[in-house]
Image (spheres, rainbow, N blue to C red):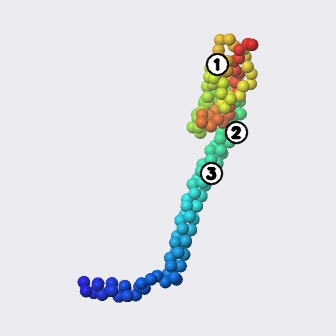
Amino acid sequence: MDGDRRAEEQVADLQPAEESSELRESRAELAAMEDRWRRVLADLDNFRKRTARELQRQREDERARVAAEWLPVLDNLELALEHAKGDSDPVVQGIRAVRDQALSVLERLGFPRRDDAGQPFDPARHEAVSTVVDENTPPGTVLHVVRPGYGDEHTLRPAAVVVSTRSH
């Protein structure tokens, strides 16, 4: 114990009673460096977060772009099936299966086909291509879907619809 006490006294003798100006400057410089270091760390963290958000947005945009490229193909499959009507030919059944598979892929990508007939017209989800006077339905109701729309949270393509109106 005596040895420990002597060591503490020797260390105390080495430390000046007042800090030298050089030591104060060094401590201030160290504090400034530590502040800059913390700011750089915060900037780096913000950069990482911003980059991750941008990457996610680019992925979503690319997924939507690729999905949108397939819509004309899907429309043509629908047109072929419309012309075939209830035909039980194996080729027609094959086209129906391909159409169903394409619809399933779009749904998994986050762009399900919407059934908008009977729904209120929504300019964010619908594109009115015509209006029809119909006294039996409320004005602004989608009567017929000319071209289906795809997407829930993000609209891949608005539905082209015929909307009801009242006569004046």
Binning the other alpha carbons within 10 Å of mark 1 as few (below 14), some (14 to 19) or many (20 upward) gives few
Residue designated by label 2: 69
Q: Are marks 3 and 2 in contact (CB under 8 Å)?
A: no
Residue designated by label 3: 54
* Badge 3 amino acid: Glu
**161 is higher (above) or lower (below) than 105:** above
Residue 49 image-quadrant placement: bottom right
Residue situated in front as seen by the camera: 167 or 91: 167
Binning the other alpha carbons within 10 Å of mark 3 as few (below 14), some (14 to 19) or many (20 upward) gives few
Q: Position of residue 104 (x, y in %)?
A: 58, 34
SS category of the residue bearing label 1: loop
Please state which of the two labelled residues, at mark 3 or mark 2, is closer to the viewer.
3
Compared across the picture, whether 133 is left or right of 110 comes to right
* Badge 1 amino acid: Gly
The answer to which of marks 1 and 3 sits earlier in the sequence is: 3
Q: Quadrant of the C terminus?
A: top right
Q: Residue at x 55, y 71 (%)?
A: 32
Q: Residue at x 68, y 38 (%)?
A: 68
Q: Position of residue 144 (x, y in %)?
A: 68, 20
Q: Quadrant of the N terminus?
A: bottom left
Residue designated by label 1: 86
